[in-house]
Amino acid sequence: MTTLALNNVRPYGEDVTNILIDVADGVIDAVGENPFDDADEVMDCGGNVLLPGLVDMHVHLREPGREDTETIATGSDAAAKGGFTAVFTMANTSPVIDQPFLAEAVWAKGQEYGKCDVYPVGSISQGLKGEQLTEIGLMSRSGVRMFSDDGKCVNDPQLMRRAIEYAKAHDVVLAQHAEDHRMTEGSVAHEGEQAARLGLRGWPRVAEESIVARDAIMTRDYGGRYHLCHASTEGTVELLRFAKNQGIDVTAEVTPHHLMLTDEKLATYDGLFRVNPPLREARDAEALKQALLDGTVDVVATDHAPHGSEDKCVEFENAKPGMLGLETSLAVVHRIFVEPGLADWRFVAKVMSERPAEILRLKDQGRPINVGEPANLVLVDPESPWTAHGDEMASKASNTPYEGIEFSARVVGTWLRGTQTYDSKKA
Ligand code: DOR
Ligand code: ZN
């Protein structure tokens, strides 16, 4: 048996302990008061924080089709560097992931590379056209757990109703990108004072909220597991609260950028800050923060969206929406919640690992740090200042909205089933 000792760690930022990993089986073999000095490999972890490997329900790895901006391999590297052991990559690739063999190919590539479990998300409509449903049943039998037309909204209510019914029958998650496209034609920024001042066409809150309200009622009447992608407004939070209070089976995610950034960032017309849904106002960010704290919003998901400079360093209106997230999300969540004392590391484990694993029913992710559990782990140094630079990222693209911002929490190491997938000392 090959063993690895992670000595002197603080699981969930709590008391110091020592962890012994059975590397071949990829499980935690022992947890003990005394350091495991006889292991084949011994690491002194300096009292750093140990969490279950992070799970991201929403990324775009751009393969197949835009391998010039990200691949399953480079995206897996970025994920491992960010502390993730599982990610769900969206279907808006070229071709769209709308058939079983495409989903199977994504999963196989991720496994072959081996740095992160890359779960394919299947599209709801064929070719993301919003017209014909995909074979949700067939794809679910190929292991697809979540379906989404993300990037686009399933606007047609009748198509959405059918999707909800099929998703229910096959017991899979339906993830909606809530945006009434009729209300956002040509929109590039949040509809508000800032967009008016800058002369940018606005994307009103109601374009999101009207879909959330409709979908919540549909989920009430037709059932199924509904998940809301990137909640971005105060009103959405109120609607989620209403739905949850009614016992409707809805879950929701918020991105790090909607928590940390607002449309004030648009003042320089920098295309890096164009994203869908758009950065909103301080009161929206505040409502999302409270919602994550009280469980109205379930998880943090990055919506990691790589784009090349030819699509970002252009006029704001012509910039493609989306920003990188995998390598900065833990630091952002630490900055917003842990640093000011609003929440502890247990909360971080919950919203970035346990809840997403629960929603997607992953049996080997988001598990407690205990004997017999899979060794999917991330080690974090909460006080290791670093500055975000796009050109230093593992991601193929460099469109981070945090360029030049200093963070204090840093991922030191990531392990997937006992194998180290990221080591800050070797990076
Ligand atoms: O900003 C975004 N970018 N939002 C989306 O929904 C899609 C994504 C992308 O694919 O670039
Ligand atoms: Zn997305």
Image (cartoon, grey):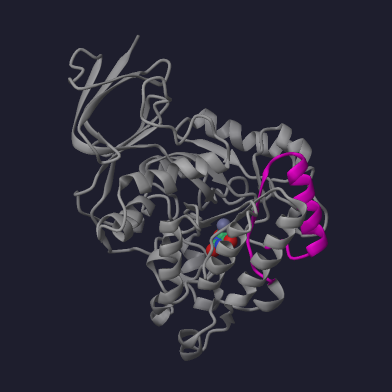
Is the residue 134 above or below the residue 154 in the image? above
User: What range of the chain is rendered magenta?
Assistant: 153-180
The furthest residue to the front: 246
* Residue sitting at x 55%, y 74%: 318
Residue 245 screen position, x and y as percent = 58, 59
User: Looking at the image, can residue 48 be seen?
Assistant: yes
Q: Nearer the viewer, residue 21 or 76?
A: 21
Q: In the current view of this chain or complex, which residue is farthest to the top?
A: 1
- Towards the viewer: 390 or 122: 122
How many marks on residues? 0
- Position of residue 396 in the picture relative to residue 124 (left or right): left
Q: Position of residue 67 (x, y in %)?
A: 55, 48
Q: Is residue 25 a member of the stretch shown in magenta?
A: no
Figure quadrant, ligand 2:
bottom right
Residue 353: x, y in percent?
44, 42
Quadrant placement of the C terminus:
top left
251 left or right of 279 in image: right
